[in-house]
Amino acid sequence: MMQEIKTVDDVRTFFNELYADGLSFHPDDLFENYVHGETGKPFYSEEESKLRNTLMAQAFEICEKENVDIYEIVLDISMKNGAAFLFKD
């Protein structure tokens, strides 16, 4: 897992790493709130969650600085990773 996010490309790399972990995520959610569906156990340890929360905060900062929509990045990557979304009008 990367340790710091400095560019928009780093944001993309971070999100791809999360999907590689098997996590379908939303950037507004804290990582300690994710649990395995079958076991109910935390997806990440306390230390792992803390690192990922820090990285997500950095991702938001970089995207804001670069005027890039973080949610568009998540949507693009999630679609490429086979995530399904249902939208209600």
Image: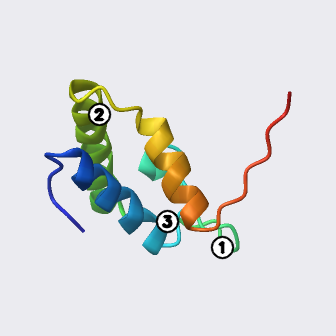
Amino acid type of the residue that numbered disc 1 sits on in the rendered structure: Thr
Q: Secondary structure at mark 1?
A: loop
Q: If you read the primary sequence from the N terminus, does the residue marked by circle 2 or circle 3 appear first?
A: 3
Residue 84 rendering spot, x and y as whole percentages: 72, 58
Q: Is residue 89 above or below residue 20?
A: above
Which residue does the image show at 49% across and 40% down from the upper left? 72
Q: Which mark is residue 39?
A: 1
Which residue does the image show at 22% across and 39% down from the upper left? 58
Q: Compute the Cα span from label 2 to label 3.
A: 26 Å
Q: Is residue 88 above or below residue 15?
A: above
Amino acid type of the residue that numbered disc 2 sits on in the rendered structure: Cys
Q: Secondary structure at mark 3?
A: loop
Q: Nearer the viewer, residue 70 or 1?
A: 70
Q: Secondary structure at mark 2?
A: helix
Q: Which residue is mark 2?
A: 63
Residue 32 rendering spot, x and y as whole percentages: 44, 51
The local crowd at label 1, few if under 14, some if 14 to 19, many if 20 or more residues have their Cα within 10 Å, is few
Q: Which mark is residue 22?
A: none
- Position of the N terminus, as image quadrant, is bottom left
Examine the rendering and report whether any part of residue 42 can be seen: yes
Amino acid type of the residue that numbered disc 3 sits on in the rendered structure: Phe
Q: Nearer the viewer, residue 3 or 79?
A: 79
Residues under numbered marks 1 and 3 in contact, where contact means CB atoms less than 8 Å apart? no
Residue with the most extreme right position: 89
Q: Which residue is mark 3?
A: 43
- Nearer the observer, disc 2 or disc 3? 2
Q: If you read the primary sequence from the N terminus, does the residue marked by circle 2 or circle 1 appear first?
A: 1
Q: Compute the Cα span from label 1 to label 3.
A: 10 Å
- Nearer the observer, disc 2 or disc 1? 2
Viewed as shown, does residue 63 lie left or right of 5? right
